[in-house]
C-alpha cells in the first residue's frame, strides 16, 4: 500500500508542479515526498517514473548530468484550458460564484506555474451574468430528460423594473418535451415542444426553476425539424453602425433590457407603465 501511495504522490507532483518550462529533478521529488511523510531513494523514484511511463503517462526526460522530468501531453493543452476558462467566465448564464468555481477546477488541469497566469482572467469588466445559482441542477435534469426521452415540468420567472424575480403566470408549471440544450450569445437555452403553444419553442435555462422530470414520454421531434435553420430564425442577428439611442418601452420589457445590456444599464421611470434607457446598439435590419 505504501509503494502504491508513493507512486501516486510522484504522479501528483509531476502533474501539479511540472511543465515544459519547469521540469523537476529527482531531488525535488524526494523533498516533496519527505513533506508528505515518505522516504525513498533515487533509484526508487526512477523506477516509479518508469512504471508511470509503462502505464501510459507522458513523462518527458530532459537528459543531463542530473535528469529532469515533466509531464508532456495532458488531457487538455494550455491553449485549450485558456479557451474553456474564457468561455466559462464570459458566460451570461452562469453566476459569478459558479463560474469562479468551474474556472478553478479547469485550472487544476494544468501545472501550478501555468495556472498563475489565469488570475487576472477572473475579473472581466462589464460582465453580465445570471443570478440563478441552481443552473447546474436545472441543466443536469433537462439533459437527463433528453437522454431518457421524457418530458419536463418547471416554473419560469422574469425580472421586473426593480429587478425582482417574479414567477410567470402566477407560478403555473410549464411542460416541455426537451430536444436540445444550446448556447447562443453567451446564454443557455433549451429547445423543445410545448403542448401549450403546440410548437417548438425556446426557454432560457437560467430563468427556469423547480424543474422535474415527468413520467410522460416526450413528444417526438418532427422528422423535418432542422435545428440549424430554427436557430437562425430565432437567434439571427446582424452587425451595423454602433450608436447610442434612447429606448422607451413598457415596464414588462425590463428583463429584455437587462438581458441584452446588463444590470447596470441606466433605466429611468417615465410613468407607471413606461421606462426609458440610454443604450449602445448596432443599427441593423434586425434592430
Image (cartoon, helix red, strand yellow):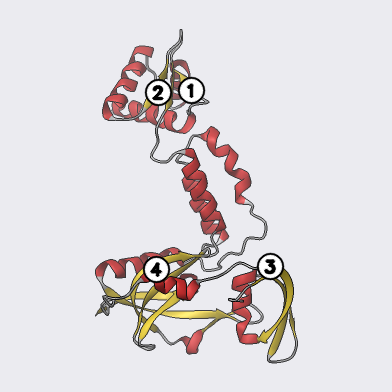
Relative depth, front residue between 51 and 220 = 220
**Measuring 45% from the left and 76% from the top, which residue is drawn there?**
203
Viewer-side label of 1, 4: 4
Estimate the x, y position of residue 128 in percent, counting from the top left.
Answer: 61, 64
The answer for how far apart the CA atoms under marks 3 and 1 are is 51 Å
Measure the C-alpha gap from mark 1 to mark 2: 9 Å
Question: Quick check: 190 above or below 274?
Answer: above
Disc 1 and disc 2 in contact, CB within 8 angstroms:
yes
* Camera sees residue 80: yes
Distance (Cα) linking label 2 and label 4:
44 Å
| Sequence-wise first label, 1 or 2 | 1
Numbered badge on residue 241: 3
Residue tagged by mark 4? 228
Residue underneath mark 1: 23
Question: How crowded is the residue under tag 2: few (<14 C-alpha within 10 Å), some, or many (20+)?
Answer: some
Q: Quadrant of the N terminus?
A: top left
For label 2, the SS is: strand
SS for dot 1 = loop
Q: Decide which of tag 2 and tag 4 comes sooner along the chain.
A: 2
Rounded to the nearest whole Å, what is the CA distance between mark 2 and mark 3? 52 Å
Real-space CA distance between mark 4 and mark 3, rounded to the nearest whole angstrom? 27 Å
Q: Nearer the viewer, mark 3 or mark 1?
A: 3
* Residue found at x 57% / y 69%: 238
The residue pinned by badge 2 equals: 60
Amino acid at each position: 500500500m505504501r509503494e502504491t501511495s508513493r507512486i501516486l504522490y510522484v504522479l501528483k507532483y509531476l502533474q501539479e508542479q511540472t511543465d515544459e518550462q519547469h521540469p523537476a529533478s529527482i531531488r525535488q521529488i524526494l523533498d516533496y515526498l519527505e513533506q508528505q511523510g515518505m522516504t525513498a531513494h533515487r533509484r526508487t523514484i526512477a523506477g516509479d517514473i518508469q512504471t508511470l511511463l509503462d502505464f501510459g503517462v507522458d513523462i518527458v526526460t530532459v537528459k543531463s548530468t542530473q535528469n529532469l522530468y515533466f509531464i508532456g501531453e495532458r488531457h487538455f493543452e494550455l491553449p485549450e484550458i485558456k479557451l474553456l476558462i474564457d468561455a466559462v467566465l464570459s458566460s451570461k448564464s452562469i453566476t459569478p460564484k459558479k463560474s469562479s468555481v468551474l474556472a478553478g477546477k479547469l485550472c487544476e488541469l494544468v501545472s501550478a506555474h501555468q495556472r498563475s497566469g489565469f488570475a487576472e482572467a477572473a475579473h472581466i469588466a462589464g460582465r453580465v451574468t445570471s443570478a440563478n445559482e441552481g443552473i447546474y441542477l436545472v441543466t443536469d435534469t433537462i439533459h437527463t430528460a433528453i437522454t431518457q426521452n421524457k418530458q419536463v415540468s418547471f416554473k419560469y420567472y422574469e425580472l421586473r423594473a426593480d429587478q425582482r424575480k417574479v414567477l410567470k403566470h402566477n407560478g403555473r408549471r410549464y411542460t416541455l418535451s426537451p430536444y436540445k440544450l444550446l448556447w447562443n450569445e453567451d446564454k443557455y437555452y433549451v429547445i423543445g415542444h410545448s403542448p401549450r403553444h403546440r410548437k417548438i419553442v425556446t426557454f432560457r435555462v437560467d430563468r427556469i426553476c423547480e424543474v422535474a422530470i415527468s413520467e410522460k414520454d416526450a413528444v417526438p421531434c418532427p422528422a423535418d425539424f432542422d435545428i440549424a435553420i430554427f436557430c437562425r430564425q430565432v437567434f439571427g442577428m446582424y452587425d451595423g453602425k454602433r450608436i447610442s439611442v434612447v429606448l422607451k418601452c413598457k415596464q414588462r420589457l425590463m428583463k429584455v433590457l437587462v438581458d441584452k445590456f446588463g444590470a447596470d444599464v441606466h433605466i429611468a421611470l417615465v410613468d407607471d407603465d413606461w421606462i426609458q434607457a440610454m443604450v449602445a446598439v448596432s443599427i441593423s435590419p434586425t434592430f
